[in-house]
Image: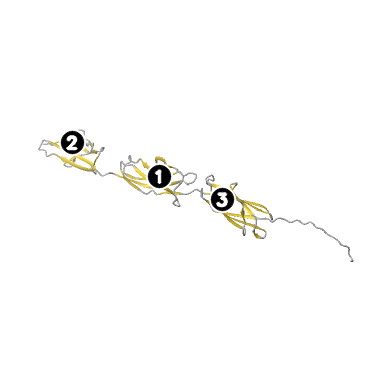
Amino acid sequence: PIYNPSNATRTFKIKNRTATITINTNTPKVEGELTANITIRDETGLVNRGKIIVLVNGTQISEPISIDNGKTSIEYTLPSTIKAGKSDITVQYIDKYTNYAETTKAFNVEKYDINAEIKDITIKTLQNTTINTQVVDTQGNIITQDMDVEVFLGNVSVLNTTTRDSKLDITIPTDKYLAGKYDLTFKFKGNEKYNPLDKTVKLTIENRDAIVNIITNTPKTLEELEITVNVNENTTPLNGGYVVLLINSKTLKDTNNKTIKLPVENGVVKYNYKLLG
């Protein structure tokens, strides 16, 4: 041989790959489902190895998940401890051929909108208003948390109450209001799970219909005309109010020339009128 044996040695370094993590989420409701679509890539494209650990607000929500074709999805039911507002999801990627990678993304948790079916209402004077309705979210599900409600008649607060078992079952004190049209507003205050709601309907208060029946004797000249007036609503004698009598289309007046107003008691008014010669 012409040459003696010779050896050469060179040290080289193998570097781990670098991964990038992409997270896309939905916008979940309070105590609803969080869906996250996760993609892992390195310098060559989608990875087909390693595992991820998923955390929500710093708490691990599952066992490590194997990655297949660089993508995976998770669904997670939010616990009641996660309130409406900003939260975050963190994905940690672990693989012996790749540097540790971690990405955090914020997501928003929304409250549910609600609705209560309350239609325009018509009542009579001297009557209270009764409301009995189910409170639901906009998907038609009954609400699962009670909430405070304030009721306004016009601009006046007339009742503070609370829903019970998703129902609004109340009596509104409207018996002192005169006939007319009013705005009746229900202010649902909302809570940790549901948004507030203002709902306004029309309240129409109508006057009652009184049935008046007049009974008289048959007097002779210079005698007294005995007048009995029965005032009823349907068959119920009325109390309160007054009757004004007219004889031959002329209103009866007292010695001070003021109209005589005869009070109604138990549905009856009695009056004796002296006939003139």
Amino acid marked by disc 1: Leu
Which of 22 and 238 lies nearest the eye of the viewer? Answer: 22
Residue 234 location, quadrant: top left
Mark 2 falls on what kind of element?
A: strand
Judged from this view, the residue extending furthest toward the right is: 2
Q: Which residue is mark 2?
A: 271
Whether residues under marks 2 and 3 lie with C-beta atoms below 8 angstroms apart, the answer is no
The C terminus lies in quadrant: top left
Q: Is residue 52 above or below residue 124?
A: below
Q: Is residue 11 above or below residue 80?
A: below
Mark 3 falls on what kind of element?
A: strand
Which of 63 and 202 lies nearest the eye of the viewer? Answer: 63
> Can residue 154 be seen by looking at this rendering?
no
Q: Looking at the image, which residue is at 20% across and 40% down?
A: 230
Q: Position of residue 240 (x, y in %)?
A: 26, 37
Amino acid marked by disc 3: Phe
Q: Is residue 5 above or below residue 99?
A: below
The N terminus lies in quadrant: bottom right
Q: Position of residue 157 (x, y in %)?
A: 40, 40
Q: Earlier in the sequence, mark 1 or mark 3?
A: 3
Q: Which residue is mark 3?
A: 107
Q: How many marks?
A: 3
Relative placement, left or right, of 118 versus 272 is right
Q: CA distance from mark 1 to mark 2?
A: 50 Å
At label 2, counting other C-alpha atoms closer than 10 Å, the crowd grade (few under 14, some 14-19, many 20 or more) is some
Judged from this view, the residue extending furthest toward the left is: 220
Amino acid marked by disc 2: Tyr
Q: Which residue is mark 1?
A: 168
Residue 226 location, quadrant: top left
